[in-house]
Image: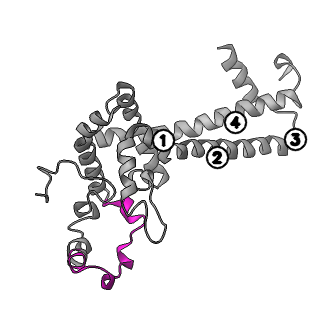
């Protein structure tokens, strides 16, 4: 209590320092805080961090076009699984606090446990992407700039109809583009 | 994720944002007050008006 009163008294009292010095401390301190906060948050977006729990799935991506391709552009976990907008990212990070409990309980602490839970995790992620119109796909893949002459016939047929009309979204068809598919029984549209 | 769960996480998530800003203000102010106390604001608290 004493420290709180002292702190409050200090905040209410004028400083002997020059106004520029006080403002400078706040300005520089604000930049440092914001930089440290976002750096810390970005650290939780790194592949090494994700591998801490999801190691089997991080290994799988190395076999896909999202990891290695002719142009050298690659996606890491957070590019597809964490919203890019700051407010949406904070909501997702707060939601991830629940996953810390799963980490503490060792819910997917072994490969066996992970594969047993894989479908549950995949279904949740597919649902999330259906609800946000595959926003994380669209961060890189823009429908407006798709060149249908470069696509296969089946792709053109689906993209020019179902995707163009909004009837379907990317994830409805493009499941398992960066990971192996789980057991797809009872998944709508798959048989 | 159910609608209820979705609403819950969005309320908590957006509620955390002002907490982050206030925590930043608190942290910067504590460090700034400490730096000032080492230089310009050396007089004891009791002598302040």
Q: Residue furthest front?
A: A63
Label 3: which residue?
Answer: A18
Residue under numbered circle 4: B28
Residue A19 in the figure: left or right of residue B19: right
Nearer-the-camera pick, A130 or A180? A180
Q: Is residue A103 above or below residue A159?
A: above
Mark 4 chain: B
Dividing the picture into quarters, in which one does residue A129 lie? bottom left
Q: Nearer the viewer, mark 1 or mark 3?
A: 1
Q: Are marks 3 and 2 on the same chain?
A: yes
Residue A65 appears in the rendering: yes
In this rendering, does residue B10 appear at all?
A: no
Residue A114 position (above or below residue A139): above
In the rendered structure, are the residues bearing label 4 and label 3 in contact, judged by CB atoms less than 8 Å apart?
Answer: no
Q: Are marks 3 and 2 in contact (CB under 8 Å)?
A: no
Where residue A3 appears, as percent x and y from the top left, is 69, 17
Instruction: Give how far apart the Cα atoms at labels 4 and 2 are.
Output: 13 Å
Q: CA distance from mark 1 to mark 4?
A: 28 Å
**Image coords of residue A109 (percent x, y):** 35, 31
Q: Residue at (35%, 43%) from the top-left corner?
A: A56
Q: Are the residues tagged 1 and 3 within 8 Å (C-beta)?
A: no
Q: Are marks 4 and 2 in contact (CB under 8 Å)?
A: no
On the image, numbered disc 1 is attached to which residue? A49
- Residue B32 placement, left or right of A82: right
Instruction: Give the labeled residue for mark 2.
Output: A35
């Amino acid at each position: 209590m004493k420290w709180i009163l002292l702190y409050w008294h200090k905040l209410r009292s004028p400083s002997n320092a020059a106004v520029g010095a006080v403002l400078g401390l706040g300005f520089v301190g604000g930049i440092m805080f914001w930089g440290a906060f976002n750096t810390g948050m970005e650290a939780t977006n790194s592949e090494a961090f994700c591998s801490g729990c999801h190691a089997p799935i991080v290994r799988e991506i190395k076999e896909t076009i999202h990891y290695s391709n002719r142009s050298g552009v690659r996606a890491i976990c957070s590019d597809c699984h964490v919203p890019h907008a700051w407010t949406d990212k904070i909501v997702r990070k707060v939601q991830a606090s629940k996953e810390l409990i799963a980490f503490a309980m060792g819910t997917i602490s072994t490969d066996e446990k992970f594969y047993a839970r894989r479908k549950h995790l995949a279904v949740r992620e597919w649902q999330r992407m259906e609800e946000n119109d595959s926003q994380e796909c669209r961060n890189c893949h823009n429908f407006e700039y798709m060149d249908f002459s470069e696509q296969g016939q089946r792709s053109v047929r689906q993209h020019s109809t179902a995707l163009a009309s909004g009837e379907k979204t990317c994830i409805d068809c493009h499941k398992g583009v960066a990971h192996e598919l789980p057991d797809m029984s009872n998944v709508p549209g798959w048989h | 994720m159910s609608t209820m769960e979705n609403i819950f996480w969005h309320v908590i998530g957006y509620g955390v944002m002002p907490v982050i800003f206030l925590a930043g203000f608190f942290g910067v102010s504590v460090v700034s007050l400490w730096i000032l106390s080492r230089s310009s604001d050396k007089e004891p608290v009791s002598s302040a008006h």
